[in-house]
Amino acid sequence: MLDRYLWGTASRLSPEAAVPVVDFVEQSECLGGAGNVAANLSALGARVECFGAIGTTSRDARCATACALHTSLTKARSLTHGV
């Protein structure tokens, strides 16, 4: 699971509803769910072993990239054959 954050500035409220209108600036993604917990535990010094299935779509590649950004999780390998 990936958490996606949209960054921008809000200078006014929408006339249709009381919500801010955001001028989009950038987007970032990081590990979410169990991946976030694993990365946090590993950063605290715990030995963490993760397993799961990942496909071959662009979303799956972004998830693998997010895992690779954590040096403590880089020993993981991906098996995509037959998924």
Image: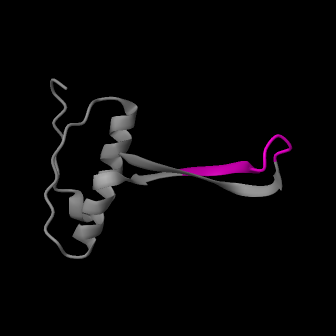
Residue at image position (22%, 59%) is 73
Magenta stretch: give its range.
14-27
Residue 15 lies in quadrant: top right
Quadrant where the N terminus lies?
A: top left
- Whether residue 5 sits left or right of residue 82 in the image: it is right
Q: Position of residue 20 (x, y in %)?
A: 75, 52
Query: In this view, which residue lies farthest toward the bottom?
Result: 44
Query: In this view, which residue lies farthest toward the top?
Result: 82
Residue 54 vs 20, above or below: the answer is above
Q: Is residue 83 magenta?
A: no
Which of 65/45 is in front? 45
Residue 70 at least partly seen: no
Q: How is the image coloured?
A: one colour
Q: Is residue 23 magenta?
A: yes
Which of 26/52 is in front? 52
Residue 21 vs 72, above or below: the answer is above
Which of 40/16 is in front? 16
Residue at image position (16%, 56%) is 75
Residue at image position (51%, 52%) is 28
Residue at image position (30%, 67%) is 40
Residue 11 at least partly seen: yes
